[in-house]
Amino acid sequence: MNFPYFVSDNEEINTAYRLAIATLSANILPFKDGILEREEPVMIAGLGYVTPWTRDAAINTWNAGGMICPKVSLNTLKSVLTTCENGYRIDGEYWDAIIWTTGAWHQYLYTGDREFLEIAYNATVNSLAYFEETEFDSEKNLFRGPACYGDGVAAYPDIYAEPGVSGIIAFKDLKQYCCDKGVGIPMMTLSTNCLYYSAYVLADKMAQELGKGKQYEAKAKAMYEAINHHFWKEEKENYNYIVDEFGGCDHEEGLGCAFAILFGVADADKTEKILRNQHMTAKGIPCVWPTFARYETEDGMGFGRHSGTVWPHVQGFWADAAAQNGNVQAFDRELKAQTENALYDHQFAEIYHPITGEVYGGRQERDHRGIVEWRSEPYQTWSATAYLRNVYLNLAGMQFDTDGIHFHPVSTELVNDMRLSNFHYRNCVLNITVRRTDGEKRFLMDGKETTPLVVKELVGVHEVEIYL
């Protein structure tokens, strides 16, 4: 593996970058499952785990893995597929499995691997058909299922919680009378439905690349309208979190709002309002805000494991959403918080306390002990790749598309000068320098001024210079 080197005039970001690379590399291990025919190196979820998870596989590929360790990310994506009558289907927790499509698409953008794209398209089409049959609510035109990252009941209102039960999946057994076909947990969440919208859009993009016909344009449009109809609340200028038969939940879901912006579910007006109104804690965007009352403590320092706490992978998507929409202040604030949290005890942990920035697993129901504080897993892969995402996509400004890399670095005040070297892209190696100046914006390739695009056919070693 050829990891890129990064150095800037901000020593804290330099150190955090090295920690992120170290965390990713430490979490690459041999593994065999899914459609892998033999043990291959994959990205596992973190130091506390021994396997990949479907959503982690997708997020880690999308964030950075597909860029800097593409063979490993390819293995990881394959390891969470299963076979079915028509080829392949995405495996793992049913509600967030569809995020695999977004990760797979970015693997293709980074590598141009058309053989994998055929697999990805087949798995996506089969998975969409399966989930349309089992979890789609045709009345609301939304998919049922918990939030993308929300395994635990700490992510949800009291109706979904039972004493001594920590996993949301138990709801189907404890309250089967509330459930519909499929697993049928009767909630529809913002993040999960944004991911289904993305899957419809990307399935058609995959089809175009493969010379196949589009088939999801109408479904994508209908989902776009349904999400904005059911979740958007103009009076608070933001999206609600949950739609269900119990009155829903008007909390803010950080990941859902970031996805709504990144996938274009939120138009320019909604995006501006979300970026202005989203609640921030001292140590970054909370996963869900506010925490649910059952997790509060008298000293005001208690938060749910999946509500009120700061998860770095959510921070990464939020910072990216801000940067892609010109809100440099929000990007700077989140990148600074990410950096400070990582340097607090020199690791990218799973979860942090929103007030102190300490590693903190949050509170949640647990067997006979009631509500207790859980452990925050150490050296979590998606926490590290979330940081790499913002170095590569925003500090260096790389935006990947089917024609190559378009460069649009963020003019952040956190970094004036930076260099990213040994960055492997398909058949070339890029050494990228970005400098903030008071002069005219310029983009140079090998000393010659040109348009800010590195085409996918480029070969050899090349110097990229960007003056902001």
Image: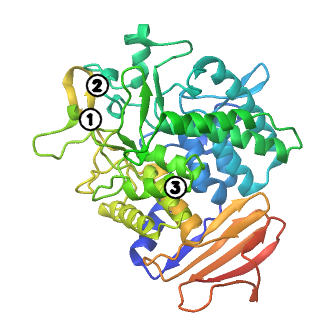
| Residue bearing the label numbered 2 | 158
Query: Would you say residue 308 is visible in this rendering?
Result: yes
- Judging from the image, what secondary structure is the residue with disc 3 in? helix
Q: Quadrant of residue 434?
A: bottom right
Circle 3: is it few (<14), some (14-19), or many (20+) Cα within 10 Å? Answer: few
Q: CA distance from mark 1 to mark 2?
A: 8 Å
Circle 2: is it few (<14), some (14-19), or many (20+) Cα within 10 Å? Answer: few
Q: Is residue 279 above or below residue 466?
A: above
How is the model colour-coded? Answer: rainbow
| Disc number placed over residue 292 in the picture, else none | 1
Q: Is residue 394 left or right of residue 459?
A: left
Q: Earlier in the sequence, mark 1 or mark 2?
A: 2
| Residue bearing the label numbered 3 | 269
Amino acid type, label 1? Phe
Percent position (x, y) of residue 413? Answer: 43, 78
Q: CA distance from mark 2 to mark 3?
A: 33 Å
The front one of 299 and 52 is 299
At x 46%, y 79%, the residue is 415
Identify the image quadrant of the C terminus. bottom right
- Judging from the image, what secondary structure is the residue with disc 2 in? helix
Q: Quadrant of residue 104?
A: top right
* Marks 1 and 2 close (CB-CB < 8 Å): yes
Q: CA distance from mark 3 to mark 1?
A: 29 Å
The front one of 45 and 274 is 274
Q: Earlier in the sequence, mark 3 or mark 1?
A: 3
Query: Would you say residue 53 is visible in this rendering?
Result: no
Circle 1: is it few (<14), some (14-19), or many (20+) Cα within 10 Å? Answer: some
